[in-house]
Image (cartoon, grey):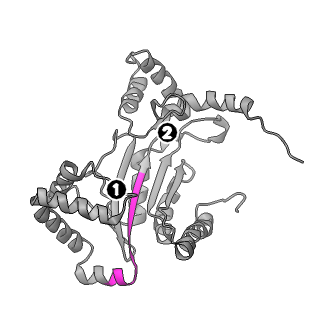
Amino acid sequence: GIPRPRSEAELDPYRARFAAMFRRLRRESGVRSYLAHTMTVTPQNLAEVAGVVASVPSMGYSMMSFQPAARIGDDRRWAGDLDEVGIDDVWQQIEGGVKRRVAWEAVQFGDLRCNRTAFGLRVNGDWFPFLDPDEPGDLEARDWFYSHLGGMEFVGIPKTMVVLKLLRCFIEHPSAFSVSGCYVRRMVVRVGGVRKLVAALVRQRVAALTFVVHHFMNAEDVAPAWRLMEAGLAADDVRVRVTQERLLACVYTMAHPETGRLIPACVQHSVLDPAENRGLRSLLPLTVIR
């Protein structure tokens, strides 16, 4: 509804209005939702990330996702040197908005240069990590989860089935009782103790919140890297070789609709999308309806 916002803060009323629609949907129709707020970060709005992190989660979003801009598509869309904004720069802004360290090292998806994720809990407006990488007990609980529950599906199935699966796992692996009990105790202490947690639960001031940064790559780097990979060749150029390494480690792949082949997101957006979009313009030409 806003034609040309001059700052991220100007968008807050619209963000809040969007989230309110889903609360109404839950209240009136019983439909649950998971809201993820995404934001492209450029040199022009980098300094505003902390403000977004401070204001948006309380609106009802469960994920805050940030993507440093990559040169993909029409070059006229981008101004300045986008390489000035790196994953560390964005993460520093996130921590500025949270006003504490946002620990991410306990869990890693794909290449460190591409992804950074921190799972946590908001209690009375303060954010606390589910896993502290400096806490050996948390790492033990993480490893136990990967070993015994890593392949279990928790989303989209009846709660009764989830309980039965967990019960079976706990019976088969009695160490689960001590590992999970110690983890829960640490988490309760981390958020301020039983009394504070119970009070926050009563006031409905407890919610999960995940922070994510995806650092996509420029098309000018991805295109030659992918061309060589398709030919089974490793690049001699250092920058292109780094791009190949990141593509090989990609966990953000998508199945191509025609072949079913898993394609790294950066390849899809940088290499395949432009050609497919040209074809779509011929197959589905824009027409003006009067």
Examine the structure image and report whether residue 183 is included in the region drawn in magenta: no
Tell me if mark 1 has few (under 14), some (14-19) or many (20+) residues whose alpha carbon lies within 10 angstroms of its own. Answer: many
Image quadrant holding the N terminus, namely: bottom right
Looking at numbered disc 1 in the image, what kind of residue is underneath it? Ala
**Image position, residue 157 (x, y; %):** 37, 59
Can you see residue 217? no
Residue at the spot of label 1: 118
Looking at numbered disc 2 in the image, what kind of residue is underneath it? Asp
Residue name at image x 52 percent, y 54 percent: 38
Mark positioned earlier in the residue sequence (2 or 1): 2
Residue name at image x 39 percent, y 63 percent: 209
Q: What stretch is highlighted in magenta?
A: 199-212
Examine the structure image and report whether residue 210 is included in the region drawn in magenta: yes
Question: Looking at the image, is mark 2 or mark 1 nearer the viewer?
Answer: 1
Tell me if mark 2 has few (under 14), some (14-19) or many (20+) residues whose alpha carbon lies within 10 angstroms of its own. Answer: some
Residue 41 vertical position relative to residue 210 in the rendered view, above or below: above
Out of 103 and 197, give the one closest to the viewer: 197
Residue 235 vertical position relative to residue 270 in the rendered view, above or below: above
Disc on res. 83: 2
**Image position, residue 162 (x, y; %):** 29, 61
- Number of marks present in the image shown: 2
Residue name at image x 45 percent, y 42 percent: 215
Quadrant housing residue 264: top left
